[in-house]
Image: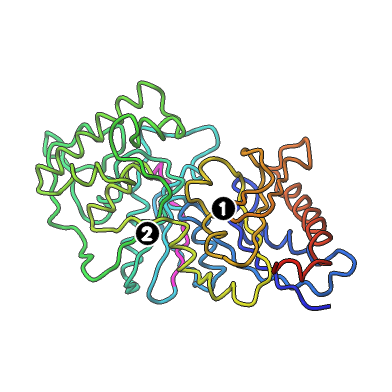
Amino acid sequence: MNTMKVLLALDKFKGSLSATAAAQALSVGLTAHPGTSGVECRFLPLADGGDGSVQAALAAGFAPLPMHVSGPSGAPAIATIAFNGTAAVIEVATTSGLQMLPPGNPAPLSSSSNGFGQAIKGTLGHGPTQLVLALGGSATTDGGAGMLSALGMRFFDAAGQGFVPAGGTLKDISYIDASGLVPLAGIDLVAANDVQNPLLGQDGAAAVYGPQKGATAQDVQLLEAGLAHLVQKLDEAGWPASTCARAPGAGSAGGLGFAAMLLGARMVSGADFFLDLLDFETALQGCDLVITGEGKLDEQTLSGKLPVVVARRAAPVPVIAVVGHNALGVDSLPENRISAIHSLSSMTALDSSRDPELSEALLTELGKQISATLTPHKDSIHS
């Protein structure tokens, strides 16, 4: 039997498994079925710029760089940066993320992105030439003011007192002094995200994402007014804030996309960028099949999220998707080069999205089913 080489290029299954853990569970099943001694699994854990981006970079050979930061509520935390000597991947999710707050206790008005800025500043001391800002999983809607504070921008109230603004106190900014901002010249700033929202308005950071972070309708109004006030004060200080606020992606991560663009960052599709960063093409070489996937397949997936991008980039190698839940209700996406879709939710009445052990068991069983279907027909995969 010829060896079938399968590339497992999965994103995380949010809430239950990392990309690496999901691939490992699937590979156990793929190689466990009778007669599958000819199956060889190759791992490439992936990310699209959200939480899990650092883990994916570490799995691809980046080194961990621990960093002391203040979490979204100000509590001390240790975040991990992924660094390969030139490029560093820094996540919002693990420096100023919603996952860092106690369950059921969001802080939509008082949380800050200061820890994300602290991680950026700390990483600069290691001499990177590229900073990859993974904008996903934010707890805050502070327009990136906390991040900018950590990087040396100073905010003052009407009494002349300096303070670090949070979403609920953006309205208190009287003037801004950016003379102490850390120099970023010569560093390629990349903001990776998968949303196109502007900073302000009905499609903006507060209106669309504020409620997901615990904001009430009244909170959303306060946050929106605060973000507009921040833009005005930055304009007055000589920054192109109004222009950046209108740009697609400015509303990502509670406005961190906006702040990143102010600093000169280029906004990129998270999925495509991470496939390049993690060298997808090299991992793909010699493979007969790609299995990709994520926690949920839905309409957003069709707008360029990871499984669709993987399928496009894998051509002409066949692609199967394995997901936690398939909200599209179809068993294939031929127009997107995905020949079959398998979901964990179709295998159980239980909720696997918060149950790592159940997710692992289902993925292993799914691996067995896929292996039994495909292995005898290796030659047909190329047809």
Secondary structure of the residue carrying tag 1 is: helix
Q: Name the residue under label 2.
A: 119
Q: How crowded is mark 2: few (under 14 residues within 10 Å), some or many (20 or more)?
A: many
- Between 28 and 368, the one nearer to me in the picture: 368
Magenta: predominant secondary structure element?
strand
Q: Which residue is drawn at 75% across and 73% down?
A: 4
Q: Nearer the viewer, mark 1 or mark 2?
A: 1
Q: Is residue 140 magenta?
A: no
Q: Quick check: 126 left or right of 31?
A: left
Q: Residues within 10 Å of mark 1 (few under 14, many from 20)?
A: some
Residue sticking out furthest to the right: 34
Quadrant housing residue 370: bottom right
Mark 1 = which residue?
A: 336
Residue 211 horizontal/vertical position (percent)? 44, 29
Identify the residue at horizontal 65%, vertical 48% (top origin): 16
Image quarter where the N terminus lies is bottom right
Q: Give the spatial CA distance, label 1 vs label 2.
A: 37 Å
Work out whether 346 lies above or below 182.
Answer: above
Q: Which of marks 1 and 2 is nearer the N terminus?
A: 2
260 vs 298, left or right, is left
Which quadrant: the C terminus?
A: bottom right
Q: What element carries label 2?
A: helix
- State the residue at coordinates (49%, 41%): 101
Q: Where is residue 376 in the image (x, y as percent from the top left)?
A: 84, 67
Range of magenta residues:
72-83
Picture quadrant of residue 198: top left
Query: Which residue is nearer to you in this view: 115 or 305?
Result: 305
Per the rendering, the mark at residue 276 is none
Give x and y (percent) for residue 112. Answer: 35, 43
